[in-house]
Image (cartoon, rainbow, N blue to C red):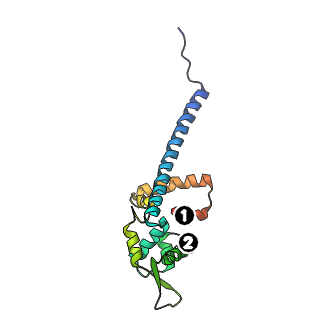
Amino acid sequence: MPRIKPLAAAEDVNARVSKHDELSTQVLRQFRMVFNSVRSHFREVEKTTGLGGAQVWALSHIRENPGLGVGQLALALDVHQSTASNLVRSLLAKDLVKTEQAKQDRRSVRLLIRPAGRAVLRRVPGPFMGVLPQALSSQDTAALRRLKRDLAGLIETMAPDETAAKKPLAQM
């Protein structure tokens, strides 16, 4: 009677590697779906409004917080102050917002939305902040903690430019 040989160690390792590669591919597909969803949303926003996603998000914050300053806008959007200044400059050039000097400190300005800016926001498809920030804010705290921990490991492996963390997705 022929004996059945146990799997060789190399075959066992290959089976594990294959499962690992399959799982890695599945996760890659998930990232593609996230990125494509973000990109599609920003394309639709730009097509509909003529503005980039970061501009729309800034405009919506200015509408919701009349009189906020550029520094406050930068904090609200979690972007560098120079990025917020550039966003405001482009919104001013399109006549969607206006500035007023603050009464207490003449050096600082307050941002206010114009009627044209309100009209633009009425045409925005989907969330003003974008689909990814919206989806993340809808997750429970435990899920966000797991995601943060797991992404930190991935980021450590990739060693990306850390300044990209303050760059809006719409500008990537």
Q: CA distance from mark 2 to mark 1?
A: 10 Å
Q: Residue at x 61, y 53 (%)?
A: 158
Question: Badge 1, how many Cα within 10 Å: few under 14, some, many 20+?
Answer: few
Left/right placement of residue 63 relative to residue 2 reads left
Quickly name the residue at label 2: 83
Question: Badge 2, how many Cα within 10 Å: few under 14, some, many 20+?
Answer: some
The label shown at residue 134 is none
Res 129 → quadrant: bottom left
Q: Estimate the x, y position of residue 145 in percent, counting from the top left.
A: 46, 57
Res 13 → quadrant: top right
Q: Amino acid at mark 2?
A: Thr
Q: Secondary structure at mark 1?
A: helix
Q: Residue at x 55, y 74 (%)?
A: 86
Q: Quadrant of the C terminus?
A: bottom right
Compare residues 91 and 141 and report the one nearer the observer: 91
Left/right placement of residue 66 relative to residue 153 reads left
Q: Estimate the x, y position of residue 139 in percent, counting from the top left.
A: 40, 57
Q: Amino acid at mark 1?
A: Gln
Instruction: Give whichever of discs 2 and 1 has the lower sequence position.
Output: 2
Asked if the residue at tag 1 contacts the one at tag 2, i.e. Cβ–Cβ closer than 8 Å, the answer is yes
Q: Residue at x 53, y 70 (%)?
A: 79
Residue 24, placed above or below residue 56: above
Quickly name the residue at label 1: 171
Q: Estimate the x, y position of residue 111 in percent, counting from the top left.
A: 46, 81
